[in-house]
Image: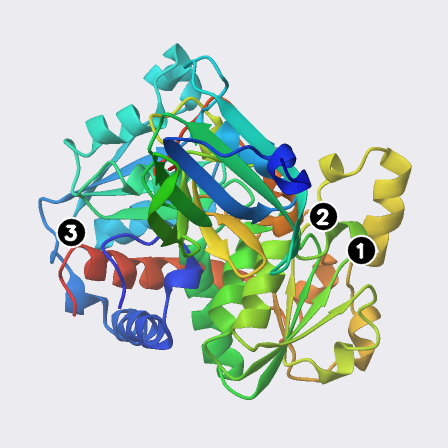
Amino acid sequence: MLQDHLISAAHLSRDDIEAVLDHAAAVDADPELVRDRHDGRVLALCFFEPSTRTKMSFESAMKRLGGETIDMGSVESSSVKKGESLADTVRVIEGYADAIVLRHPSEGSAKLASEFVDVPLVNAGDGAGQHPSQTLLDLYTIRENAGLDDITVGIMGDLKYGRTVHSLAHALTNFDVRQHFVSPESLRLPRNVRYDLHEAGAKVREHTDLDAVLPDLDVLYVTRIQRERFPEEREYREVAGEYRIDNATLADAAGDLTVMHPLPRVDEIAPEVDETTRAKYFEQAHNGVPVRMALLDRLLGGAQ
Amino acid sequence: MTDKELRVSKIRDGTVIDHVTAGQALNVLAILGIDGSGGESVSIGMNVPSDKVGQKDVVKVEGRELSQSEVDVLIIRDFDVVEKNRVERTDTVRGILVCPNHNCITNADEPIRTEFEVLSDGVRCAYCDTIIREGDVAEHIDARGSGETAL
């Protein structure tokens, strides 16, 4: 079952996922269902790294549930700058709030923080580790557009450092999904994720080229390849250029392909794709609100 | 005195850790925090022929009875084996290994000890999920630390 905290998508069962997605669908259809349910409750937003979508959608979700949010502010203006440990920071903040959303640059930070607090804690990204609430809204989007069983999903880009990729790959093992991973050799899935997928008996294949697998895909999940992952600018440009998509790239794809991206994008997806029915990345971002409303409602004890 | 006795001498009282994986005796001592500063006699046999496993290491600590944890632990009193424990592999290793992922929160200045789940062919950081293969584990022993799984 969904635990008191949401740390890793690897901890989520199919039942957990479906319960959140079903609740999100109900909330999406009728927001009145949960309006003011968490009146007087407070959600703490602790972002040690910049965030736009995740932070604002959690804030919007909590307010739509009738609650309030408090924000740690930037690291530059907080006691962290004075050398306070993460353990101490969250122990203090739990006294101010009924739940905590944490983003931190170190892998394992959310697990550590959860060991020092009694209020529910959501991992909103721990370094290159996990981003499970993003995965829930990704799954919601996939379910709405392609269903979650007997589908083929391609995940492309920075698979090594992409925390949304790691969480999504784990979660998809709960469903009848064929997973294709497309990346440069240097950015392939990390060993621990490959190990878990193997242990879960997932149907997985890795590629360096999208072309061969594109016609088979129901969903293409694109992620950004970051400049700082490469020692030289030239190498970055060469590699990144091979993993961009536009309408010409997608010519051989199924007509009802669902194209997703956790955003922000830089130039991985050409703007011309936005105008096609395949583009679902803005819908995906919007789904962050009902899905996080459903998640917070469960973690705060409002929904079973 | 036989050739075998010359390699690793008998002890009167203390502990023998037998059937240590060949080549790992010094790591066992490091994990136990035994560096000779306590004054105890320590004998080490490395790559000793073994009928059971081909080659093994043996560690003998005079005058100190260690509690059980790993491999075969024999407690010796007056040259006799008074206790022999065959110890199973532990599920979790706490406080002994350092995570090789520099960006793991366990490498920051936080009030926690490292924790690794033991897999069939290595260990895995409970915080950042980094896997260390079995053959590489010894490289990541924290020379300063002694953990819960220590003898």
Gap in angstroms between the C-alphas marked 3 and 2: 38 Å
Q: Write down the residue under mark 1.
A: A184
Q: Label 1: how many residues lie within 10 Å, few (<14), some (14-19) or many (20+)?
A: many
Nearest to N terminus: mark 1 or mark 2: 1
Image vertical order of residue A176 relative to residue A119, above or below: below
Camera-near label (1 vs 2) is 1
Quarter placement of the N terminus of chain A: bottom left
Please name the colour scheme applied to the rendered image: rainbow
Q: Amino acid at mark 2?
A: Ile
Q: Secondary structure at mark 2?
A: loop
> Residues at marks 3 and 1, common chain?
yes
Q: As rendered, which of A287 and A10 lies closer to the eye?
A: A10
Q: Position of residue A170 (x, y in %)?
A: 50, 65
Q: Label 3: how many residues lie within 10 Å, few (<14), some (14-19) or many (20+)?
A: some
Camera-near label (3 vs 2) is 2
Left or right, A44 with respect to A49, comes to left
Q: Residue at x 85, y 57 (%)?
A: A242
Q: Residue at x 60, y 61 (%)?
A: B52
Nearest to N terminus: mark 3 or mark 2: 3
Q: Write down the residue under mark 2.
A: A225
Q: Amino acid at mark 3?
A: Gly
Gap in angstroms between the C-alphas marked 1 and 2: 10 Å
Nearest to N terminus: mark 3 or mark 1: 3
Q: Residue furthest left?
A: A40
Q: Write down the residue under mark 3.
A: A66
Q: Position of residue A2 (x, y in %)?
A: 27, 64
Asked if marks 3 and 1 touch (Cβ < 8 Å), the reply is: no
> Residues at marks 3 and 2, common chain?
yes
Q: Secondary structure at mark 3?
A: loop
